[in-house]
């Protein structure tokens, strides 16, 4: 199964996958908004996306990474922000392959680690992450402060 770093030419295939990903997390958005968001990420290069395809070229899943710094380590790191595999392609090792691509990219960039978070209800994801050596943080809580959108 081919996995490659996504470019603007992949946008047409990424948008519906990303829409399904947002539906999975019960936060659907209109496709034009998703397209604008992903086009900006790909154009600006402020995230890195990998896309998995089958042998016929059908897009099956993606992983999106954002660079960050691990302040306590004084080193660069990556946030594994989004991982999604289409419903019909699950249980075929695609999520694991995308996770390996993310790790290889982080290692090639000299990162000290990868950080991710997932829903407490995403037991399948948790099992995958732990099988791949990710350790659940039991010391820190995650907090979020929602801010008003510009123009609201």
Image (spheres, grey):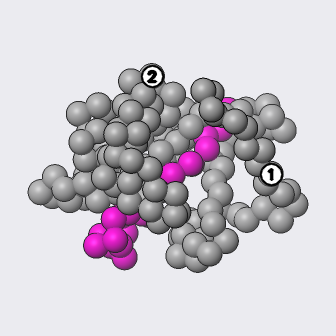
Q: What stretch is highlighted in magenta?
A: 76-97
Residue drawn at (44%, 35%), measured in percent from left and top? 37
- Could you give the CA–CA distance between mark 2 and mark 1, rounded to whole angstroms? 27 Å
* Badge 1 density bin: few <14, some 14–19, many ≥20, Cα 10 Å: few
The answer to whether residue 4 of the structure is visible from this angle is yes
Which residue is the site of mark 2?
44
Image position of 121 (left or right of 55): right
First-in-chain label (2 vs 1): 2
* Badge 2 density bin: few <14, some 14–19, many ≥20, Cα 10 Å: few
95 shown above or below 34: below
Give percent across and percent down for residue 122: 58, 72
Image position of 16 (left or right of 148): left
* Mark count: 2
Residue drawn at (83%, 65%), measured in percent from left and top? 138
Q: Which of 134 and 65 is in front in this view?
A: 65
Give percent across and percent down for residue 41: 44, 31
Residue drawn at (16%, 52%), measured in percent from left and top? 57
Q: Which of 72 and 36 is in front in this view?
A: 36
Could you tell me if the residues under marks 2 and 1 are in contact, i.e. CB atoms within 8 Å?
no
Q: Which residue lies furthest to the right in this view?
A: 139
Q: Which of 130 and 11 is in front in this view?
A: 11
Q: Does the magenta stretch include residue 96?
A: yes
Q: Which residue lies furthest to the left in this view?
A: 56
Residue drawn at (39%, 33%), measured in percent from left and top? 36
Helix, strand or loop at disc 2? Answer: helix
Figure quadrant of residue 118: bottom right
The answer to whether residue 50 of the structure is visible from this angle is no
Figure quadrant of residue 126: bottom right
Which residue is the site of mark 1?
143
């Amino acid at each position: 199964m081919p996995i490659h770093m996504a470019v603007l030419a992949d946008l047409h295939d990424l948008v519906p996958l990303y829409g399904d990903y947002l539906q999975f997390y019960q936060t659907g958005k209109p496709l034009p908004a998703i397209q604008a968001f992903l086009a900006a990420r790909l154009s600006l290069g402020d995230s890195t996306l990998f896309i998995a395809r089958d042998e016929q070229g059908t897009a099956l899943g993606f992983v999106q990474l954002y660079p960050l710094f691990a302040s306590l380590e004084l080193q660069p790191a990556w946030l594994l922000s989004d991982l999604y595999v289409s419903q019909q392609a699950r249980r075929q090792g695609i999520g694991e392959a995308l996770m390996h691509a993310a790790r290889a990219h982080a290692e090639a960039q000299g990162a000290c680690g990868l950080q991710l978070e997932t829903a407490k209800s995403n037991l399948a994801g948790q099992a995958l992450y732990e099988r791949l050596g990710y350790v659940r943080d039991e010391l820190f809580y995650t907090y979020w402060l929602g801010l008003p959108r510009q123009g609201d």
